[in-house]
Image (tube, helix red, strand yellow):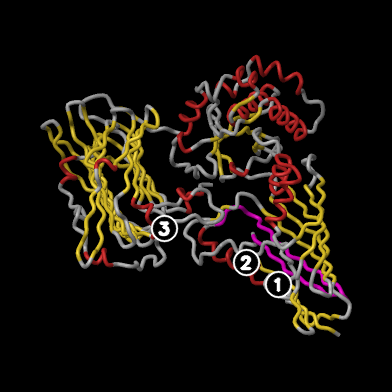
Amino acid sequence: MNYFSALKFKILLIALIFSFNGLMAQKSPIKFGDIPTSDLEAKVYAIDSSASAVILCDYATLTYAYYSSGLKTMFTHHRRIKILKKSGYDWATFETMTRGGNQESISGIKGATYRLVGGKVQVDKLEKSAIFENKSDKNFTSHKFTLPNVQEGSVVEFTYQIQSNYDTEIPTWRFQHSIPTLWSEYWVNAPNFYVFRLHTQGYEPFVISKQDQSSIMLEGSSYASTEYHLAVKDAPAIKEEPYTTTIEDFTAKIQFEIAAYVPPNGISKNFSLTWENLDAALLGYDSFGKLAKPDGAVRDIVPFLKRTDSDTLAHLNKVLDYVQKAVLWNGDASMYGSNTRKKVLESKLGNSADLNLLLVAILKELKYEAQPLILSTRNHGMVNETQVLEKRFNYVVAGVLMPNQQWLLLDATDPMCKAGSVPFRCLNQQGRIVASGTGEWVEITPKEKYTAAQSVSVTVKANGDAEIKGDLLFQGYAAMAMRKVYQKEGEKALGEYLKKEYPNLQIKSFKVTGQSKYEDAFTISVDAEVSEAVNILGERMYIKPSFGLIDTENPFHNKDRKFPVNFGYLQDDLSTIMINFPEGYVVEELPKSVKAVTPDKMVNYTYQLFANGNQIAFMNKLFVKKTYFYAEEYHDLRQVFDLIEQRNLQQIVLKKK
């Protein structure tokens, strides 16, 4: 399933060329130094009254010209910003990069700050001494500046050009940023012997989207060209929201991918890849395919890992455990091995690919149908099946084809993960099995859920304090997270976790079980107190039945959402709280029990209260049965979480007899 169908993600195969002559004729929407008085006087903008700054105009052209050294591109960028608050001052600082030593050069940097002083425009120009260059390595140079004397109400602008020898590469253009953008426009003009695929993504509509045929002069000859013109108006700020991958997956932008070079006289070159081409390329790399094959070192290991019974899962976990102990993960996540197998085994240290490709090789030697599966981690972005780009992937795990023809995934970087579970960073919808001629797409569906359960007894005292005793139980991904805290830093760190997670509780003591046996639940038995746990007003006692033990805040604060919700894993959240209240009181009012479910029944919530004598049973249950919710499902999802928050604000009312 292609999850990018949720985006307005289009792919156009078009012929482009950058024309220096053609684009120079295009009229810029703004002129450097010509600042409308209305922008200088503005205090707020209707697009977002809370914005700390607003991009008034973001305009760029990419031109093409022939020089003595060959064809070059010229990228020209002009940006103007209104600074509204001190928190927006960072937008007066800009940094860009040039690449490849003398392959790219920057020129024409100009900048200025404008503000009204006594009804007149004061201009502070960017000085050359305020432009800083830093060579981070032999391949990249940073160019950075901060526009001078910025204050609340200032308008700042800058412009620059980058000349590049990378004639087959066009810079990606973002129409959307973390502050609102009133106008964003991009012109590209290119001879028709360059063929590009254009990938546009995001949710903001284009107010201009044109492709016009033109011509340009190169070395005294006229060549057919194509001009491509895109613009977006009033793009809102794009901000991080809960349960997403990276926000870059949803930002409005356009990317150019070279597909072919077809010169009028000369040899054509096809840059297009199929997935089969990519599979073959990866399998040919020493840092990938070679490491996925059994070798002498693997054959020396295998006799110690021979299968002794019919329990396939137990055997896979035995192999996984061996690799996790034989080579320690150094914390680097990669799709490519960092060293030869011999050196990795000798040093007992490697990156994620070193470990997981070793795992693939061992499993192959053990006669499993094992292959590497490449993926993109959550913070790297989602993968689109229509874009055959190696750079979209950044991680590899092991896949084993089981008798039911389903792929079981394994990852050796995390001792908490057993066969069928991969680290949370890998839960990004889908990956690709890399195999010669038989590569395929696989949905990354974790074997484990995120399960948290509480079984607690609360004794309310006559003075309003309460004693709490019970078990906090964690399974699946919840248990993995808790075991990491416990095994890395011990009980002290776990105590700090409890204080942070349950700030209302004064923890008297706690005991941990299941900390080492991964198939068991990780359980914390707690003995705690809560001061002023209930409100006493006259003859009545008011009790919130969760006692701060349940996270009831709705994480979905925004009324609307344009992009999907991605939980990563399925979730079960169960709480049972037995409330014992003092003699001399009776239940006057009990919140009504409710049940809520989304239309597709993939989210279920139950809130129940039962009274019997001096005891009240409270049950709060939430089940999330799928990991991915489209934007169209957001309102239904948010309603359920709204109900959770609202119900847990309800109070039990007790009255003295």
**Mark 3 nearby-residue class (10 Å; few <14, some 14–19, many ≥20):** few
Rendered-image quadrant of the C terminus: bottom right
Q: What element carries label 3?
A: helix
Which kind of residue does numbered mark 2 sit on? Val
**Is 339 located above or below residue 312 in the figure?**
above
**Residue occupied by mark 2:** 640
In the image, taking residue 153 as reference, residue 582 lies left or right, namely right
Q: What element carries label 1?
A: strand
**Is 495 located above or below residue 587 in the figure?**
above
- Give the residue at x 69% y 27%: 323
- Give the residue at x 82% y 65%: 467
**Residue occupied by mark 1:** 594
**Residue occupied by mark 3:** 87
Q: Which sits in the foreground, 335 or 333?
A: 333
The mark that comes first in sequence, 1 or 3, is 3
Which kind of residue does numbered mark 1 sit on? Val
The mark that comes first in sequence, 2 or 3, is 3
